[in-house]
Image (spheres, rainbow, N blue to C red):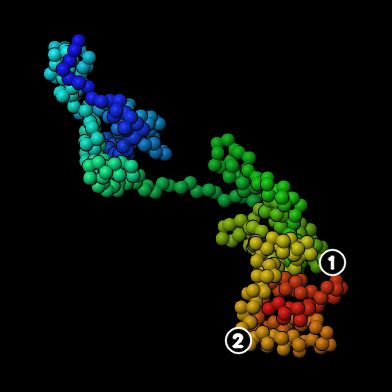
Amino acid sequence: ASTTQLGADKLGKFLRHDRQVLRFYLAWDDRTSMYGELRPFILHYYLADDEVEILEVKRANSGRDPFPAFLKKGKLAKDIETLVRTDAPTTHTTQLIDRSGKVDPDSLHYFSETDFAVGKEVHIQGITFLIHGCDAYTRDYYMRVYGLEFEDIPIQFDHTVVRPQVEIPPHYQGHPGTEEDSLGSFLYLTPKVPKKNHARMMEYDQKVFRFMGRLVSDAVEDGDRVFVIKYHLADDTVSVFEPPARNSGIVGGKFLERSRLRKPDGGWYLQSDFFVGAQVVFYTHKFILYQADEYTLALMEEERHLHPMSDADYVMQQLGASLRDGKKEELAAKLSEVDSDSSGFVSYDAFQRALKGVSLELQDQALITLMRKFHSGDANSHTVNAAEFLGSL
């Protein structure tokens, strides 16, 4: 059958607008009904064939099943009459019939690109949506084609709700296992094995910091007690051992089992917390670290990014900034005074007295770093090369 109505140039429109899609952001306010809420949606308008699809934005913990396709892609009718079948005339249709026996296209009402704009309400399938925004391409398209400028409307979909937090009970030291083991039983129905940093365990296997420490206590019997404090770099654990001392009245041995320990502020003790002169607190027992072995000092100097007081260049830079306004000459005079034999080498104690003479109170670890840096070179001599030290400032 022939018809006098010519179809639109669908092929030309497809070639001009293929893969060009307008994107609008919608909001459906259903809070007036029982259990209703403000829900976000995305509308896609395909310029190639004037078809529309609506997708629901998935939100975490919304209580809804993940069905993103709220409306399948297709021609979107404006009214119920347009939804009537148009392939053949019936006695129930309200559209006009042309001479070909088909429904007159002018009587069909579908949404087009001119029906959408930011700030406008659209009624789709009995639901009223508010268009509150669009993407950059859509905003540029309407400005270029229609001269319209869109501004997004801010909408808050998720209300901030203060949810009650489960209080984690403290780890009881009498229970077997570590704190991570106890948390695994508390947080999960089926306890999980705590994860370990295997890369760090392989890199720092058998690497241990060893310090000598004293117990800070008002008790007289604790004044002479000495402890060996070990920090295991592989798993960040700490152990404390007290060497037996004759006639002390205190049984020596293991003082603290190897385990991860928390600082008074709640964080874990880490590698950077241990250095000569540091104060550490293990279960209300305060220790002062006053000495470290050669291996520990060398390892701290090797990883100077975690131990800045073991970086000789950094310490000298800070020291040079303090020796201004004639203080450097004053320090040279002090070092010359303590150098009794004019050999250019001074003892550790004399070097420290010279620094104090110019009001330089260095931290213990920084002082040890300088002594190791400018050591005289004789393994049996505890002296500092004063001339080299002054020349490096």
Residue furthest right in the image:
380
- Answer with left or right where residue 156 lies relative to residue 375: left
Q: Secondary structure under badge 2?
A: loop
Q: Amino acid at mark 1?
A: Arg
* Residue at 76%, 59% in the rendered image: 241
Q: Quadrant of the N terminus?
A: top left
2 or 1: tag closer to the N-terminus: 1
Q: Is residue 368 visible?
A: no
Which residue is at the front of the view, 66 or 182?
66
Which residue is at the front of the view, 208 or 144?
144
* Residue at 70%, 54% in the rendered image: 233
| Snapshot quadrant of residue 125 | top left
- Answer with left or right where residue 320 lies relative to residue 94: right
Q: Position of residue 355 (x, y in %)?
A: 69, 82
Residue under label 2, please give it.
325
Q: Nearer the viewer, mark 2 or mark 1?
A: 2
Q: Residues within 10 Å of mark 1 (few under 14, many from 20)?
A: few
The CA span between labels 2 and 1 is: 54 Å
Q: Position of residue 218 (x, y in %)?
A: 67, 72
Residue under label 1, please give it.
246
* Residue at 17%, 20% in the rendered image: 5
Q: Amino acid at mark 2?
A: Asp
* Circles 2, 1 touching at the beta carbon (< 8 Å): no
Q: Residues within 10 Å of mark 2 (few under 14, many from 20)?
A: few
Using the image, determine if residue 207 lies above or below residue 141: below
Q: Is residue 318 visible?
A: yes
* Residue at 76%, 74% in the rendered image: 374
- Answer with left or right where residue 30 lies relative to residue 334: left
